[in-house]
Amino acid sequence: MIAPPHDPALALKLLCDPTRLRILGLVERAELSVGELARALEMAQSRVSNHLRVLREADVLAERHAGRTTWLSLAPLDAAPGGAALLARLWAALRADLPALPEHRADVERLERVLAERAARSGEFFDRVAGEWDKIGVDFATGQARQRAAAALLARESVVADLGCGTGWYARALAPLCSRVVLVDRSQAMLDEALRKLEPLPPGVRVEARRGELDALPIVDGELDGAVAGLVLHHLAELDSAVREIHRALKPGGRVAIVELAPHGEEWMREALGDRALGLDPRDVLRALERAGFQHVTLESLEDRYRPHVPGDDPEARAALPLYLVRACKPARA
Ligand SMILES: C[S@@+](CC[C@H](N)C(=O)[O-])C[C@H]1O[C@@H](n2cnc3c(N)ncnc32)[C@H](O)[C@@H]1O
């Protein structure tokens, strides 16, 4: 082949070969080594080399040498004079129809794999896909594998309660980490909803739903290793009896975590969300815990915000109320 052909018949002859068209279709997408190209075409290198020689002689392919590797790409045909410009025009007319080649789709899929393997080897692959990884690379049927691996690091023989559980957000976080979760709420409908949302349960966990009041917990003395009370204390008429009940229900050394709203002025929450108090002063919570006999009582503000929907015409309207966490420990027996 005379390179690059001015003669239209020769130029057509050069491109009148499915393998050459497939090669051009691939090197147009990415610069490839000869080995990578052969893998993307699923052909022996010796067979590919003959075609490469023809295309190289016609200046259709550009070569770059790095160490022992020769990298191939489509020559910038547009910028080339004479015969190369003729090839450029022909190629521009043909490339849109490459999908009509029977092998094209498989070529492109293999090319993607070849490029992914190259990127994985160089370590850049995960850098590139980090932002997308949860969409493309993570599909676990149940999520059990991760839950069990995480739970394997912790003492799992614990019994915990989600007090005023509502729809069971805390119970869902706790279930993979312990052996028994006790749901307590005064509303049977909430208990049913929480149970439903806990399905499927992680293996080896028992969940019990017990309807009852925080100031008369349906829990025997010392049954719990831990208890969480999330946004429930502000529903109570007074704190002391509920906090004493939590103390009674915990084992010596057991812990309680309380999430509450700081005092706020959103009056509408009384009616719309059934709130009795508009938040709680954290000092009142700390004092009630200490009065009940808890130790190591600590207070932390949380970066989180409680964002209930504000009733009205705007479906997007939400409050953003500060939250705090109080932790405390029932003293271990001396
Ligand atoms: C605001 S919801 C919080 C639910 C859940 N803890 C959360 O953070 O998503 C309050 C829940 O406490 C329950 N509750 C209110 N007063 C209660 C009481 N005295 N005893 C038991 N449950 C109560 C309600 O039925 C409701 O399900």
Image (tube, rainbow, N blue to C red):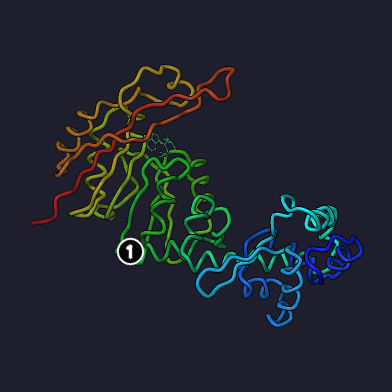
**Along the line of sight, which residue is nearer the eye, 241 or 290?**
290
What is the quadrant of the C terminus in the image?
bottom left
Q: In this view, does 320 lie to the left or right of 63?
A: left
Q: State the residue lying farthest toward the right.
A: 9
Residue beneath the point at 25% across and 52% down: 221
Q: Is residue 330 above or below residue 37?
A: above
Residue beneath the point at 37% across and 59% down: 177
The x and y percentages for residue 134 are 53, 54
Q: Is residue 16 left or right of residue 39?
A: right
Residue beneath the point at 33% across and 41% down: 229
Q: Residues within 10 Å of mark 1 (few under 14, many from 20)?
A: some
The x and y percentages for residue 24 are 74, 63
Quarter of the image for residue 205 reads: bottom left
Quick check: which quadrant has ligand 1? top left
The x and y percentages for residue 69 are 55, 73
Q: In this view, does 81 lie above or below 211?
A: below
Quarter of the image for residue 25 reads: bottom right
Q: State the residue lying farthest toward the left.
A: 334
Going by the numbered disc 1, the residue's amino acid type is: Arg
The residue where tag 1 is placed is 156
Residue beneath the point at 25% across and 35% down: 241
**Along the line of sight, which residue is nearer the eye, 235 or 1?**
1
For ligand 1, tell me if the residue under mark 1 lies within 8 Å.
no
The x and y percentages for residue 133 are 52, 55
